[in-house]
Amino acid sequence: MSQTTDRSFDISQSLDDLGPDERMKESSDFLRGTIAEGLLDRITGAVPSEHDVKLMKFHGIYQQDNRDVRDERRRQKLEPAFQFMIRVRLPGGVCTPSQWLMLDELARRHGGETLRVTTRQTFQFHWVLKGSLRPIIQGLHEALLDTVAACGDDSRGVMCTVDPRSSTLHAEVASLAKQVSDHVIPKTRAYHEIWYGTQRIASSAPEEPFYGPTYLPRKFKIGFALPPSNDIDVFSQDLGLIAIADDNGLEGFNVVIGGGMGRTDKDPSTYPRLASLIGFVPAENLMACVEAVMGVQRDYGNRKNRQHARFKYTIDNKGIDWVREEIERRMGMSFAKARAFEFTSNGDPYGWQKSPDGLFHRTVYIENGRLNLRALDVFREIAQSHSGSFRLTPNQNIIISGVQENQRKKLDSIILKQLGPDQPSALRQNAMACVALPTCGLAMAESERYLPELLDKVEAIL
């Protein structure tokens, strides 16, 4: 059987012949499972059902435990010190001051007085107890934020280059990033029923008109890049969209597909892959392109082996030419020839930057993306009077954006007083660590907690 016709592992097969996660998703009643019942179980700090633990990822929640005390609790015959991580959906990393103040309040009350800025431009709450899950999600809802599809087999958070020097183009592309994110998140009402307490309403309309009951084979990452900055690492995305503009504004996007840097240890059949450039699409056809690309992965992705379920493996199995032609067939149009572009940087511009609209933007270095209590105090004070926005960068820093010239000295004094000078060395600018111990269940060693000490030692040598 040829590569392009082998469908022995995709959704065309019987669920009984596919992986257990596919059967779990199909039987979940569109991501409801028994999550609501598990939240009411006061006997345990966990969500008891293993299926519900997986389903909660679609709701932006990971169940974890405090590994610093895991062995001691085991010796005392106690269950693990269960806790949860909540990831916010924040397309393009743009956050208003009012949203920041709500995030700050929730972190202080329910998240161990800390927030984590991620490399996909959003926030994570750590150290969340089961009884605090609903209060956090309902608080986010009050600020017009949610955690839908921040994890799970769906479109994850949509990224967008943060470049304060191109304010008009950034605003347009960031708006499109949000539109794409809103368009591709699951449409099930399970999230509203479980977390907001809304009643289930009977309807004859399909609950998931695009995803269906089994969603995608694996996570799907989308990112928008604005040359000359490639801060989002567009060639690492499942679907990368490179903005092409002229003097009259945005024309459209070069499309790259099939990126992904992950691999499975001791499994040589898994590998990192840079995304392939397949052509140009006008801005008005963007949504059709996104749906077509995701539709190919939905229908042809590997659902038997999750280690091979990412889009990059679908492309290499079918062949890039076949995949491009299938996307074009679904779009009802052909890709145009890719336009010329150039990337010259992937870092953050430090200090003050002025954009064409006359406003100013200041990047604040955040080590490891970890906002501790001191940093929270600083940004709360800024958010209380700031009239612009905050932008999270893929390098885990924060840009205070849209500042009037007469406010610059005040902001500088607040930052310097509490955080000190924030012009990091080149080494620190390019250093980052995953959270790892004590919260991540996959960690095998220290990472975030050790990185500052490691950098001190390396800088002493240099």
Image: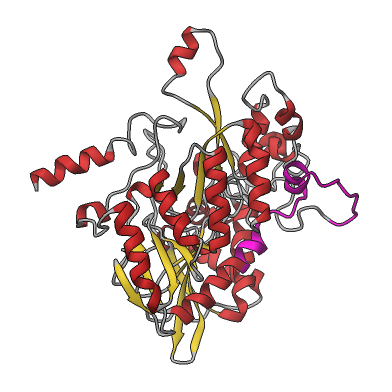
Camera-side residue: 323 or 394?
A: 394
> How far across and down, in percent of the image, does residue 434 sit?
38, 42
Camera-side residue: 317 or 80?
A: 80
What residue is rendered at 53% in x and 44% in y? Answer: 107
Residue closest to the far bottom: 248
Question: Is residue 384 inside the magenta stretch?
Answer: no
Q: Is 419 displayed left or right of 80 in the figure? A: left
Q: Is 449 displayed left or right of 200 in the figure? A: left
Q: Is 431 displayed left or right of 377 in the figure? A: left
Name above or below for residue 73 compared with residue 446.
Answer: above
Question: Is residue 204 inside the magenta stretch?
Answer: yes
What residue is rendered at 64% in x and 57% in y? Answer: 143
> How far across and down, in percent of the image, does residue 212 sit?
74, 51
What residue is rendered at 32% in x and 65% in y? Answer: 412
> How far across and down, in percent of the image, does residue 238 sit?
50, 58
Is residue 364 visible to the viewer in this orientation of the structure? no
> How far across and down, in percent of the image, does residue 323 sit?
55, 63
On the image, which quarter does residue 39 sit in? top right
Q: Which region of the structure is painted magenta?
A: 179-205
Residue closest to the far left: 461
On the image, which quarter does residue 45 sit in? top right
